[in-house]
Amino acid sequence: MDQEALKKLCAEAALAFVEDDMMVGVGTGSTVNHFIAALAGRRSRIAGAVSSSEASAKRLREAGIPVLDLNGTGGCDVYVDGADEVTSQLAMIKGGGGALTREKIVAQASRKFVCIADASKLVAVLGRFPLPVEVIPMARSLVAREIVRLGGRPVLREGAVTDNGNAILDVHGLSIVDPVALESALNQLPGVVTNGLFARRPADVLLLGTAEGVRRIDRSPAGVTVPSQ
Ligand code: 5RP
């Protein structure tokens, strides 16, 4: 099975977490696009969707799924999103598609976070994938210098403007052994809007698309993961 087929497999498995009348948070990216296509078949049974990007909002509307402003909801029952890297503790690097800030907001506002990813995204240590950091444009150089001090090699994502009108620095050369600490440290830098580490609010469930089928990993409240099969 190719990577696209594995993405589709785990995306369709996420439908099992969508119940009638739920408010569904929807992430961004090629894996989520498969989820949106699958969710279209349930459009009349859900309360609606909250989108993490303009791109996903457009796809949702095209699929006939009502898109709501997060402020008008009491949060989401479930949030389904992909990842660029994910550990077995369900900490992630996200933001390859540039939607990290809204993704982190919707994730935080959701009662359950289901991460969907093909098997290539599972890693022992985060950091091979360059860590995206969304920055206020005037603080780009300041933040880049601070990141160098923290041991990273920031590269400006040329031409990228986020849905919030900001720039993205992709940080290379990190081996992130303590993702919670680095997530917090980066958030302290003036000019940083969000960074792509999702460790303080990790996923609750990972659905991994593998050649053998969908492998489910649940995060226990203590942070110990429990393979379900
Ligand atoms: C977008 C994201 C995506 O979830 C991440 O980049 C994975 O994308 P894909 O499903 O296309 O591999 O964080 O900002």
Image (cartoon, rainbow, N blue to C red):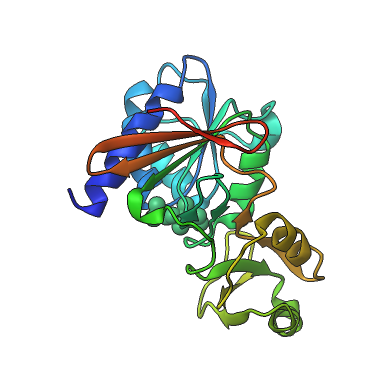
Q: Position of residue 104 (x, y in %)?
A: 63, 48
**Which of the 4 quarters of the picture holds residue 143?**
bottom right
Q: Position of residue 52 (x, y in %)?
A: 55, 46
Determine whether 176 is above or below 170 in the image. above
Q: Position of residue 49 (x, y in %)?
A: 52, 32
Direction from residue 109 to residue 52 in the image, left or right: left
Q: How many marks?
A: 0
Q: Is residue 93 visible?
A: yes
Residue depicted at x 61% and y 65%: 176
Placement of the C terminus among the 4 image quadrants: top left
> Ligand 1 lies in which image quarter?
bottom left
Q: Is residue 37 visible?
A: no
Direction from residue 181 to residue 87 in the image, left or right: left
Direction from residue 26 to residue 29 in the image, left or right: left
Determine whether 224 is above or below 74 in the image. below
Direction from residue 72 to residue 216 in the image, left or right: left
The residue closer to the viewer here, 89 or 42, is: 89
Q: Residue furthest left?
A: 1
Residue depicted at x 69% and y 83%: 148
Q: Position of residue 79 (x, y in %)?
A: 54, 35
The residue closer to the viewer here, 165 or 206, is: 206
The residue closer to the viewer here, 93 or 11, is: 93
Residue depicted at x 22% and y 46%: 5
Residue depicted at x 76% and y 62%: 187
